[in-house]
Image (spheres, coloured by chain):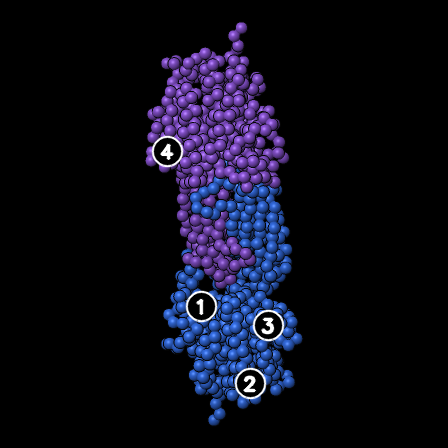
Chain colours: A purple, B blue
Amino acid sequence: MSPTPDSAVRQYVQQHRDAFLGDLADWLRIPSVSAQPEHAADVRRSADWLAEKLKETGFPIVEVWTPDGSGAAAPAVFASWPSDDPDAPTVLVYGHHDVQPAARADGWHTDPFEPRIDGGRMYGRGAADDKGQVFFHTLGLRAHLAATGRTAPAVNLKLLIEGEEESGSPNFRALVEANAARLTADAVIVSDTGMWSETTPTVCTGMRGVADCEITLYGPDQDIHSGSFGGAVPNPAAVAARLVAALHDADERVAIPGFYDGVTPLTDAERELFAELPFDEASWLRTAKSHGTLGEAGYSTLERVWARPTAEVNGIGGGYQGPGGKTIVPASARVKLSFRLVAGQDPEKIELAVRDWAAAQLPRGIRHEIEFGAPTRPCLTPLDHPALQSVARSMSRAFDGQKIRFTREGGSGPAADLQDVLGAPVLFLGVSVPSDGWHAPNEKAELDLLLKGAESAAHLWADLPNALR
Amino acid sequence: MSPTPDSAVRQYVQQHRDAFLGDLADWLRIPSVSAQPEHAADVRRSADWLAEKLKETGFPIVEVWTPDGSGAAAPAVFASWPSDDPDAPTVLVYGHHDVQPAARADGWHTDPFEPRIDGGRMYGRGAADDKGQVFFHTLGLRAHLAATGRTAPAVNLKLLIEGEEESGSPNFRALVEANAARLTADAVIVSDTGMWSETTPTVCTGMRGVADCEITLYGPDQDIHSGSFGGAVPNPAAVAARLVAALHDADERVAIPGFYDGVTPLTDAERELFAELPFDEASWLRTAKSHGTLGEAGYSTLERVWARPTAEVNGIGGGYQGPGGKTIVPASARVKLSFRLVAGQDPEKIELAVRDWAAAQLPRGIRHEIEFGAPTRPCLTPLDHPALQSVARSMSRAFDGQKIRFTREGGSGPAADLQDVLGAPVLFLGVSVPSDGWHAPNEKAELDLLLKGAESAAHLWADLPNALR
């Protein structure tokens, strides 16, 4: 009796487990820290290493791209394996091969770039974020081919693995725009997120976008004496504070006119699914290193961080900040604000709304400047999208039939650029868990979960053609 | 025909003008900068120089005191000349002999410690603040004796000229408390303020007090990711801003419960007198280097800075203040507040009110610390106080019968400690004008005004015994 596809996939994955882990460990030894110029050659080496492995995996097309074409910026790896089925849909997998800085002195128990397997986990910088989750695709793809007996994948499979994500992906959008014709896809699979927990497998359905600005307020031409003039002239530090205080109403809703225009509301179905998650506030607060919750009235903590737009002050400064006191009315003050955006919000309209709102808050005698950074758009795939259902179905098979629940991600990432430029829905296939310690000392990946990631991918490539038909 | 007292005073002052100015120039050559440790010996030399001049003037008791008794802190000069009239009131003159730092490079046209007379003005650091105004008392006292034919003043005259005023008088209150028995007086004359202008002679009737505090707000245990947690936990920078915004109501009144308790209201008479002053808002704004007025509803600019209590944010800081953005919820934020106080307000009660108010503003999850500095009390002498009337009368005689108007001073100073510790009313006899440039490059004093200060003092010593009888 020939094996069922599910057991065939698992059998292939288990048989190649040790080689897969050995290769991953080799990759983790390359300190591809994009934020540190002294590691530029390592980032390049990491790209070349991955390119070589993708060729070994069977990708007929493998290229190393430098985002700005100059060879100076951190290289991305592009690979493509067309299906032998002319009707096959095209899928683009996104991940990154650069890693956060790490040093033994930060609290690592062992060398962060000498990976170590212990208790079913692989410890090392990048094990979860994101090399482990990129690399399971090589195993998943080969399991897909082996289990289905194909010589080419059931989807036209493309990979784009960037090298600057941990540095804020400064050139990513330009890279995607410049290569849009070659990156075109029916769906984007982002493998750079995680699940709720080891025991609650989930699929992320979207990320928030972000717009940020700095507002500088100018009052007197120089710091002036608060005894001689205080109480009779506007104080830019007080105006900055009032501006920040005016960001929210008494219900902690953002009070900028027009801010919520167009926001895609949370559906009852999604709220119910969120509510099913085993959320424990005390434990969430420990993760947040915070000592209380506060947010928009009418929404749960998860809804607030995943599905509602926010206004946050990231920094404020003005006047005297040294030891002791100084009786001045300061000459200027600054606030740095960021706005998390959800589906339906347009960063350009948000910028205009913030500009209008800020200008309207200021008393006579205060001049202001406001400067916006480049925004990141939100992305969201509706729960009933067939590709999303396909991802959930494929994961459920890898997770022995467990129900796959849905989450969102409160942060923002370059995934939205892919959705935006390529016009394709973004799906998230990630198997990392909160305990993996992204960006922290002793980052690790659960070996079983990495293998389930590979299995999920193997099922997905077989399932998607039907789902998207 | 013997000269009238007024012409006799003027004659004496004019006859001794050149010697007076020569001596003052010698004193200005001593760079008694209390804030700069390298000038400690100069501050000491300045005290000794003044002590010697006071002996020459005729004071039978002249001592140099070091505020902490150790000889390390900047020395003050004490002098006393008892009246030969057993019923004479006792007057204590306050001033200071230390000066602000000054360097040619700051924009001085000539060496700040090589005084220069030009166009009826003496230029040099300390010419107006405060050596010139201390030193006119030596000439005024001798004119008083000469014009009245007395061998001892008509008042028991004491002088206390401190050496740390430009460093915030850190030891002054302790010095006054330690020597309270010897400093006891029926009235204190402070010669360390100015007049409205050259053409509008005025008497200051009080100074505001000041209480200041720093409030530190703690949120998450470290900066946390605003994408993952923002919008669901309290942000200490936002709370700091809300605290500052909550300081005032829509009428720019201080909104701290109990803040105005006990405030001595402005009388209609004083408001009318303030309104008579030739106030020009555009010119005042230039002096304030500000571009608009803003303050408590129902009060004029002068009333706001002179006679109304205020709450001011002197500094605010929290989160990321470097270039660009950083998407965090910061771990902490700080605000530095100062409160100008007017007569009737008790700094201790204000501190309690601020503490209660701040604690009541904070959401769950935000911890705070609040620390107060040493307060300075307000001081105010009512318009109908006989000693104040005597000062005005004496100045009017020096100013050829001109009407003397009344001002207040928005700042705070050690004068209040004298009122507080000695229980004596504080009067202000100062002849400096705004154009004198206190603390600025090219500080100067108007020679005619210094001499009118001497004349005013001469008249005052003759007038006070009747006024206080």
Label 4 element class:
loop
Give the amino acid type for the residue marked by disc 3 in the picture. Gly
Is any part of residue B467 visible from this angle? no
Q: Are marks 3 and 1 in contact (CB under 8 Å)?
A: no
Q: Nearer the viewer, mark 3 or mark 1?
A: 3
Q: Chain of mark 3?
A: B
**Which mark, residue A376?**
none
Say whether residue B417 is left or right of residue B404: right
Residue type indicated by callout 4: Pro
Q: Horizontal and vertical percent for residue A280?
A: 62, 31
Q: Is residue A39 above or below residue A229?
A: above
Q: Is residue A10 left or right of residue A424?
A: right
Secondary element under disc 2, as helix, strand or loop, is loop
Residue under label 1:
B102
Residue B367 % position (x, y): 61, 46
Label 2 chain ID: B
Tell me where residue A181 appears, x and y as whole percent: 34, 25
